[in-house]
Amino acid sequence: MPDVIILTNALLAVGTGSASADRDISNRMLSVKWNESFEEHDVTTMGSTVRKRAIGLGESQIECEVMQSYTTTDGGENIDNLVDTLRDRSATGGRFLVRMRKTNAGRSSTNPEYSMLCVMSERSIIDGEVGAPLKNGLTFLSADDLSRVVTSS
């Protein structure tokens, strides 16, 4: 049986600009999903006996759910303030850097870091119910190429 990887301490860091992603929101994160997809084109020509396909442009999307926060006094990020900044940056044509690793430790061949410039396309301002913690669902879309780095940081 192959080794099972249990996600327990992933790194998700965002920046408010395109140069660095220095705002670690891992200690607020409840879940994360990073998808990559490609446009599919039918390039079948006359005389073919099967469909032929070509892959076109790619796109990545990050969906995460974080616990809402309005302060930094507990050692974490002020999610409300950070998300408001990302929304403003995206709305004015700006991009920001996002980095992710499956484990919040140094980069390596067994812990690669994925990063890309993004725009924020969706957020939940308030998502909660009586007696439950407030959550904030975020969606980041690719605004440039996806990068994968395995060299140590």
Image (cartoon, rainbow, N blue to C red):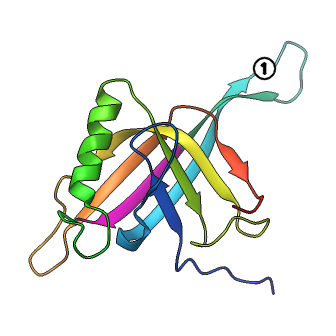
Q: Quadrant of the N terminus?
A: bottom right
**Residue 124 visible in the shown view:** no
**Residue 130 visible in the shown view:** yes
Q: Is residue 87 left or right of residue 23?
A: left
| Magenta highlight on residue 71 | no
Outermost residue on the top side: it is 46
What residue sits 35% from the left and 70% below the top?
A: 28
What residue sits 49% from the left and 61% below the top?
A: 12
What secondary structure characterizes most of the magenta part?
strand
Q: Estimate the x, y position of residue 142 in percent, counting from the top left.
A: 52, 37
Task: Give the residue pinned by disc 1.
Answer: 43
Secondary structure of residue under mark 1 = loop
What residue sits 76% from the left and 84% below the top?
A: 3
Of residues 96 and 46, which is closer to you in this image?
Answer: 96
What residue sits 52% from the left and 66% below the top?
A: 11
Q: Residues within 10 Å of mark 1 (few under 14, many from 20)?
A: few
Q: Estimate the x, y position of residue 135 in percent, counting from the top left.
A: 24, 66
Q: Estimate the x, y position of residue 123 in percent, counting from the top left.
A: 28, 48
Quarter location, residue 40: top right
Instruction: Determine whether 72 is above or below 138 in the image.
Output: below
